[in-house]
Amino acid sequence: MSVMPYTAELHSHETYLNRSYTLRSWLLTKDHKRIAILYMGSITLFFVLGGFAALLMRINLLVPAGFMAPDLYNKLFTMHGVIMVFFFLVPSVPVTAGNFVIPLMIGARDLAFPRLNLASWYIFVAGFLVTACALVAGGVDTGWTFYAPFSTGYSNTFVFLTVLGIFISGFSSILTGLNFIVTVHTMRAPGLTWFRLPLFIWSLYATSIILVLATPVLAITLVMVAFERVTGVGIFNPALGGDPVLFQHLFWFYSHPAVYIMILPGMGVVSEIVACFSRHCVFGYKFVAFASLAIALLGFLVWGHHMFVAGESIYAALVFSFLSYLVAIPSAIKVFNWTATLYQGSIRLDTPMLYALGFIGLFTMGGVTGLFVAALGVDVHVHDTYFIVAHFHYIMVGSMVMGYLGAIHYWWPKMTGKMYPEWWGRFSAFTIFMGFHLTFFPQFVLGYLGMPRRYATYDPQFQILNVLSTAGASILGVGYVLPLCYLLWSFKYGSDAGPNPWGATGLEWQTPSPPPTHNFERTPVVTQGAYAYHEMEPAGA
Amino acid sequence: MPDEDTILTREGILAEQFDDLAQQTEAGTLGMWIFLATELLLFGGLFTGYISYRLAYFQGFHEASGHLYFTLGSINTAVLLTSSYFVALAVHAARQGRSRAVSGWLLGAAGLGAVFLAIKATEYYLEYREHLVPWMDFQFEGAYPAHAQLFFIFYFLMTGLHAVHMLVGMALLLIMALLARLGRFSAEYHNPVELTGLYWHFVDIVWVFLYPAFYLLNPHS
Amino acid sequence: MNHAAIQPRTYLVVYIVLLVLLVFTIAGAYIPIHVLATVVAFVIATIKAILIVLYFMHVKESSTLVRVFGGAGLLWLGILIAGTLHDYLARGWPPPP
């Protein structure tokens, strides 16, 4: 007789995890679920590295004169930005939850192109390794934005290697986006029409559009930078009549939509979690679905708002400013609709819900401050100050990282078949939320008072706020380490989750946890919309 | 009793994530079109830069363009259009299951691709000899040497990137020709040939725009 | 997808038209008014591209979705070029030497 009957039951069916334990079966897998796990391990490591750079930066900013040489500080903020943007945030939810859940949610056996999916992961890792070589060899000091002509002509650091690494990893993004789009178009289960799809799919579809159309422009821009580094002559060189602002146009054509690549998947996660933990269909389903597409489209029209003080024409600046206000509308629609979903719902404050609620609140603050800086007059004052830093961290960290953690916690039982300890989950979410505010709210004030960003030293009047920010960062760091610990712990010691621990709707919950390799015994047939909570039994305690 | 789809799976034609060949074909076609859209934007970044500078430095660009080998460039355009025609015929043959014809037309197209690249290499060599390569001892006798350098940077980058895509395309054409020869395709299953065709035609279209952009600015060679 | 739609004769006709357009575009390059020459060259290149897309790439007989995907790529290229150019054109570009 087994000591742990649940474990015996778990292993009585073959899952994608226990199918084979060899290294080869993992490294040569075509299974989207295993590839998701491979990605999850990689990006967790990269997040730790990027976070470590941030930690060192914040320690330096404890005293006005700083502890380290300015050159080193420049390399740290560049490393932080490059790793966090390209190797954590852009992949984050799509390659982990997206890869794992999309085929399950649409009732398919796998994505459309499983081998391309595996290739995506290898390309991603290869890109990181090349960038890591640059970092190990001595780093880059241009900032993650690589502005010409400093990056192309004057920097004495490893620009070429770094942009090469990012260039390579860009193809990983493109292939993932391509895979998702084709999958959603061609592999939905019978009866699963577009308007019966979960909103997570709509969000990832919109994200994939951006991945596919924006990333190539970044790729070619990085090629131009690399070309100029290697040959010494280049397109952005004013001595030849070149225009450094052209670099900025091309760079931000990708990098602004990139921020929507980063946030849209999180929005999709929030839709799923809010529906499940308030036992309510998402209010205004079609509005939320179309809002995702609208964000993707409008996001491509606003890149010039990064260049208001770069020498852009006033006319173009006005156009970009106006369009930037427009893009706030679909984002706001989503926030209103999530709130309406919560209204009169049976709300359970489980860990994923705490992350989702945190997302909504922090996204609202970050988004509204985005409207502040979309105004030309305000931006001239706060551009390149900590106000901007706080604005995008409210969205990237406050919202998106919480969205990522929400996704991990929500689908963890499905991925592993185990539950994590709920108390620790809630405690960590709370710690992260508090630590986050303490870190980044003072930065709004700092920026408004005039403290510039990307400076290793600062005026003594800013010290108190900087110390508060660093204190917050330490708390935030603790908050991030905790899930790492208890999630890993739950692999071995967590209680068994069963197929649907949350009582959620969605095809992914109709199959065992962890799922078998081919996802479903029989292809499901869909007969109702995505969030039929009103037709379900009330969820168990 | 094994049905048609099971047989196809066993023969390695139908991948296991797909329900039937029609789904697999549709997925492959959509995937290739998305990929082509990404390629359009890849070249698009360079076109954007080129257009911006041409607007500003028209005279310099005009002057520089006069140093290109107009006749060779025009011949190359005709060569590439012909290779596209061959590929269209190859795809047509594939739809009818005529594998020998598929192989023949694809090899012909690849051969023309090789001719294109040979002519291009000749042009590059001649331009190198005339010190027109911006990073190799660039010397330009004219009113606007700096702008000429910009012109030639775009010229080499864009035609170079195009040439890289030609090489990939030729490799694909040769692989498909070989697979056709080995009897892997039929009237029911030949989507890889179609998709290779799409890629090749795209590379041709890029050249259709590169040619007037660089050579026709000043066709006096 | 109606595979029987395009016949080899059509491919030949399209090919010949493409070569004729090549001759036209070379002739057009000798137009002394540069702006006009540029416009003519661009228009002819576009016509060539449309012919290749419709016939050689079979978009004429393809599903709406394929046309949407192809069109989206074009539209986005347009956004990139228009968005960048409208800055340059409004700026008094190029800067005085």
Image (spheres, helix red, strand yellow):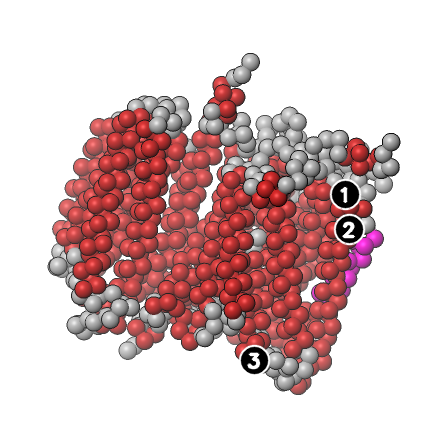
The residue that disc 1 covers is A418
The span from disc 1 to disc 2 (Cα, nearest Å) is 10 Å
How dense is the environment of label 1, judged by Cα within 10 Å: few (below 14), some, or many (20 and up)?
A: many
Query: x, y (%) of residue A182?
Result: 50, 38
- Which residue occupies 82% across, 36% down? A6
Q: Check the residue under mark 3 and report the chain it is in.
A: A
Q: Main secondary structure of the magenta part?
A: helix
Numbered label attached to residue A70: 3
- Which residue occupies 34% across, 68% down? A231
Residue type at the position of mark 2: Trp
Can you tell which quarter of the image residue A494 is in?
top right
Whether A437 is among the magenta residues is yes
- Vertical relation: A449 (above or below) B94: below
Mark 1 residue element: loop
Query: x, y (%) of residue B98?
Result: 30, 24
* B211 sits left or right of A338 in the view: left
Would residue A220 be visible to someone looking at this image? yes
- Which residue occupies 16% across, 42% down? C20
How dense is the environment of label 3, judged by Cα within 10 Å: few (below 14), some, or many (20 and up)?
A: some
What span is colored magenta in the figure?
Answer: A423-438
Can you tell which quarter of the image residue C70 is in?
top left
Tags 3 and 1 on a common chain: yes
- Vertical relation: A499 (above or below) A240: above
